[in-house]
Image (cartoon, grey):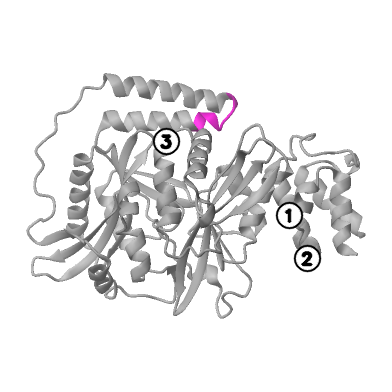
Amino acid sequence: MQTLTLYKKDLTEEFLNKLATFLNEGFPSETQTLWKLRFKLWWFSNPFLTDTTPVCWIIEDETTNTLIGFLGNLMVLFKYGNQHLRVSDGTSWYVAKNIRGPETSSLYFTFSRQKNADVILNTTPSSTIQTILPTLGFKQIGGDKLQNYMIIINVAKYISMMATLLDHFSESQSGNKAQIFVLASKVGNICSKILPKRKQAQMPAHDTDGRYIIRDCKNSQSFLESLTKHKKGNTIELSKDKTTLDWILFSPEVQALLRRTTAQIFTKTGEYCGYFIYDIQHVGKDTTLRIRELQLLKPEDAVIKLILKHAKVEAKNAGCAAVYSGLQNPDPAVDKLLHKHILLSLKTENRYYVKFRKNVITDVDPYSIYVPSDLDPDVGFI
Amino acid sequence: MTDVERIANLFSEIMEIPINELNDSISYNSYPTWDSLRHLQLISELEDEFNIEFCLEDITSMRTYKEVKELTRKYLQ
């Protein structure tokens, strides 16, 4: 067994096919096609990936030339005042089930010790890994729990999606818990098949309520202009420079994987009010509309109502099971309004962990001014 | 406290093995608690405790409690 660091030059078509097959074994609900779309977004369209930046680390059985372990690397830029921070996120860590030994730890150590990064992120750890992250020097950002809001668009699809998720969870559990998940998954599958199909209703206009108008933003330039109107504190957060926005909001690769929309809200007289960003995202064989950022200059009930109406219609048109929003670090006023208009809400575990390299930021505790977003890797890239 | 005692204390705490049951033949996967995650934790805490940084080869070579002690002490000489 050997641990290898791979670079962009190593990403041959043959290797990517092999990797997609391997990851499909590790994450059965995620198809090889989906993995290939991810590789394009993570590595081929990433403007911050240099020839010397690792794209991933693998463990290979050199005798059989077989992949047995993988940890992907997502490199993005964050900003603290005028200082750029190179941020590396580890994604999709998987080691073949029959391989268990100290060698499997090598992936994590090569990732966390890379010299290219100022900050290391882990935003989707499994619950087991989550328990050891603090001992590895990571700090959880944003408290233990996240408030999630959900609007079910299609009951049958929603149940089917939950059934898939439960089926997937059961594989990682044992004993009674696994049996409960398996049972719930089966019941869900049956329910989703016997529920009558609802006719598609004619939806009212969803981009205006007479007072406010929602417009899709088509390029980074117009978005950058509106971003300057939002107040910025002394924070550390994802850099929203033109290069980053062209990649994470408007590139063909992000559209192919996440069908990401950046929408702006204006008054009838053309005054800018705010923006929201959402994805039409795959969850197993189903899809959801996921709101990833929502920023308003002045939170107002009517604006939130219009955004939700817009999201529901877009979700319905895209055949989504549900509209979902689990905003990181929401404006409390926006959060209150979402809570008022969305009945289904639940708290889930926050899994956002950060580790700053020593002496990267010296004038302030970097963890205290860190602002997470649902657009950050890898949660915003998968 | 000697270096070996500090290693023993850490190992015992992380692997949840009573200190009086520690012996050189304890090996990776011979105790259900010594899995890849605990291995990560062990390495990380040994590095913090002794202010050292193991090389990758040594991290993957630690397969027994005896090797944990020997390889750690190599960095302390």
Residue B67 shows in the view = yes
Q: Is residue A177 magenta?
A: no
In the rendered structure, which amino acid carries the disc numbered 1?
Answer: Leu
Quickly name the residue at label 3: A31
Tell me the magenta residue range: A169-175
Is residue A33 placed above or below B47 in the rendered structure?
above
Tell me which chain the residue with mark 1 is part of: B
x and y, in percent, of residue A208 in the image: 11, 56
Q: Which residue is depicted at the point 81% across and 41% down?
A: B17
- Label 1 neighbour load within 10 Å: few <14, some 14-19, many 20+: some
Residue B25, quarter of picture: top right
Quickly name the residue at label 2: B51
Residue A134 shows in the view = no
What whole-number distance in Å separates the C-alpha atoms at marks 2 and 3?
A: 43 Å
Q: Secondary structure at mark 1?
A: helix
Q: Are marks 2 and 1 in contact (CB under 8 Å)?
A: no
Q: Secondary structure at mark 2?
A: loop
